[in-house]
Image (cartoon, rainbow, N blue to C red):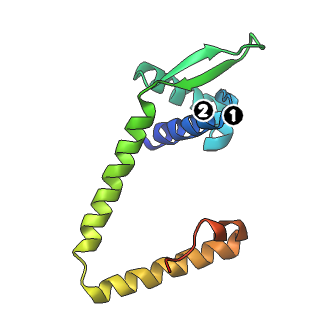
Amino acid sequence: MNRNEFQALRYLLQAQRDGRAMGPKDLAVMLHVSTASVTKIVDSLVNKGELRRIPHPTDRRATILEPIDGASEKINNAYARFHQVIVEIIDTLPEQDNELLATRIEQVASALIEDNPALEQSVSPPQ
């Protein structure tokens, strides 16, 4: 699964959790890609068995994109592995490197918060 497919599946799973129907046009906006590109992404995910197209309940011209039942587990497993690798590497760093890493991460978080103050609630340093 490539990066756009992974992101598409994440967005569709979040929409599903929120109780929102999402079609190809919505997905194109979320991914910042053209409708032609999103068609290729959706076709690929459908062919891989990760996604299905279902008819829109009120607009017969439209389709809704729906992740398969096991899609959430696949995404969670991918993030779990990512987290595991990061922790394994950070655990081997000397204390001095950990301090530098923590400082740099705080600088990144501060810069992002300056650009978007709404992030401050979700990106708070550990106490």
Distance CA(mark 1)–CA(mark 2): 13 Å
- Helix, strand or loop status at disc 1: helix
| Mark 2, residue position | 16
* Residue 43 vs residue 58, the one in the foreground: 58
Q: Residue furthest bottom?
A: 96
- Helix, strand or loop status at disc 2: helix
Circle 2 residues within 10 Å: few <14, some 14–19, many ≥20: some
Q: Residue furthest right?
A: 58
Judge left or right: residue 2 versus residue 109. Answer: left
Residue at position x 65%, y 30% in the image: 35
Residue at position x 50%, y 40% in the image: 4
Q: Residue furthest front?
A: 127
| Mark 1, residue position | 26
Q: Quadrant of residue 36?
A: top right
Picture coordinates of residue 95 (x, y %)?
A: 28, 86
Residue at position x 47%, y 77% in the image: 105
Height in image: 18 above or below 58? below
Picture coordinates of residue 80 (x, y %)?
A: 35, 50
Disc number placed over residue 8 in the picture, else none: none
> Which mark is in front, 1 or 2?
2
* Residue 54 vs residue 26, the one in the foreground: 54
Circle 1 residues within 10 Å: few <14, some 14–19, many ≥20: some
Position of the N terminus by quadrant:
top left
Picture coordinates of residue 97 (x, y %)?
A: 31, 85
Give the amino acid at mark 2.
Answer: Gln
**In this figure, what is the number of numbered marks?**
2
Judge left or right: residue 75 versus residue 56. Answer: left
Looking at the image, tell me whether mark 1 or mark 2 is earlier in sequence order: 2
